[in-house]
Amino acid sequence: MQKRSLGIRGPEISALGFGAMSLGGTFGPTTEAESFDCLDAMLEAGITFIDTANIYGMGVSEEVIGRWLASRRPQGMVLATKAGIVSGPPRRIDNSPAYLRAELEASLRRLGVERVDLFYLHRREADRPLAEVIGTLQDLERAGKIGGYGLSEIAPETLREAHALHPCRAVQNEYSLWSRQPELGLVQECARLGVSFVAFSPLARGMLGNAPLPAAAVTDWFRRDNPRFTGANFLRNTARIDRFRAWCAARGWSVPATALAWVMAAGPHVVPIPGTRRAERLREWLDLPRLGPAERAEIETILPAGFAAGDRYGDGQILAIERYC
Ligand SMILES: NC(=O)c1ccc[n+]([C@@H]2O[C@H](COP(=O)([O-])OP(=O)(O)OC[C@H]3O[C@@H](n4cnc5c(N)ncnc54)[C@H](OP(=O)(O)O)[C@@H]3O)[C@@H](O)[C@H]2O)c1
């Protein structure tokens, strides 16, 4: 497994992370035994960067990771978690010092650790001064509870402002073959500032598998209301991605591994964090093909920027996403 640095000063992490949202049941039910199998497969593959959040399964993802850490005691694991979204209803954003401190304490308890390497603001609260919020995160860093802070679903201007207040360790936005907005300034700004760019949903939430995602599998709360997974858009997107599947098959390449290699090729500071509930699916990520300029150009001819039909979020899902173009 290739290594990358988390932020400019480290720690060292695997070039591929593990997104643990699925362990909380986001895309369907799962069991602790299946989650342990996934985490064991992750460890065996040399993946040392785990991404979770307080709201993934309302604490379940963190609890399962905590029990797995206690049982396996792996060395060198780098943990990231997040807070800032209050699930509700109604769903709202809270970046107050009291909320962030209390949520971090609860996450540390569930994970069974005294410190996480990275603590993200899951969403920015628009009306709260950024200086106050970064001050809270800086205090948590000084107290030794977090190794550094991150920002999620933000615009380049917020990164510039936050980083000038106190250096940011990582930015996490959606980035994949079908969600390419970060190329319009954010990936570049992260590189310029020495901030890691963590690409979430790099497998297009299950669309970039070796087999097409069956319509019958789209029953979860997120995808069943999402413009890209519904109606004619879903059929168009599947047909488009089928051409990419055929291109990968002609080379004997795994589709998810090729999609991840494409994300990683965006820069040495870019780290994708795919998620799954199944160990055998995780293993399909690992045989990463080496993509040269010719292969990248061919992929981008088959799936050009903007190919996806439908917005990446529905109106009810877009709360507090910073839009900048
Ligand atoms: N900051 C944020 O706001 C934010 C938002 C979303 C996600 N995230 C983070 O990013 C991580 C990944 O994002 P994500 O889970 O939304 O999307 P993703 O990684 O693009 O896709 C996950 C989906 O892909 C499926 N999958 C995984 N490997 C597969 C394979 N080999 N073949 C076929 N299907 C496969 C999974 O199915 P199964 O579960 O059935 O295996 C799951 O439904 C999350 O775990 C979370 O840590 C962050």
Image (spheres, helix red, strand yellow):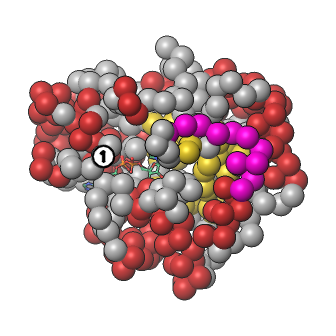
Across and down, in percent, residue 243 comes to 14, 35
Left of 139 or right of it: where is 129? left
Residue 92 in magenta stretch: yes
Q: Is residue 196 visible?
A: no
Amino acid under label 1? Trp
Residue under the point 66% across and 20% down = 157
Across and down, in percent, residue 116 comes to 69, 61
Left of 162 or right of it: where is 306? left
For disc 1, the neighbor class at 10 Å (few under 14, some 14 to 19, many from 20) is few
Q: Residue furthest bottom?
A: 71
Q: Which residue is disc 1 drawn over?
A: 221
Residue 144 in magenta stretch: no
Across and down, in percent, residue 262 comes to 38, 40
Q: Is residue 144 above or below residue 280?
A: above
Q: Residue furthest front?
A: 89
Give the secondary structure at mark 1: loop
The quadrant holding residue 11 is bottom right
Residue range corresponding to the magenta coloring: 91-102
Q: Is residue 50 above or below residue 37?
A: above
Residue under the point 23% across and 41% down = 224
Residue under the point 38% across and 37% down = 176
Left of 103 or right of it: where is 325? left
Q: Residue furthest top?
A: 325
Residue under the point 69% across and 39% down = 95
Q: Is residue 19 visible?
A: yes
Q: Is residue 129 above or below residue 96?
A: above
The quadrant holding residue 201 is top left
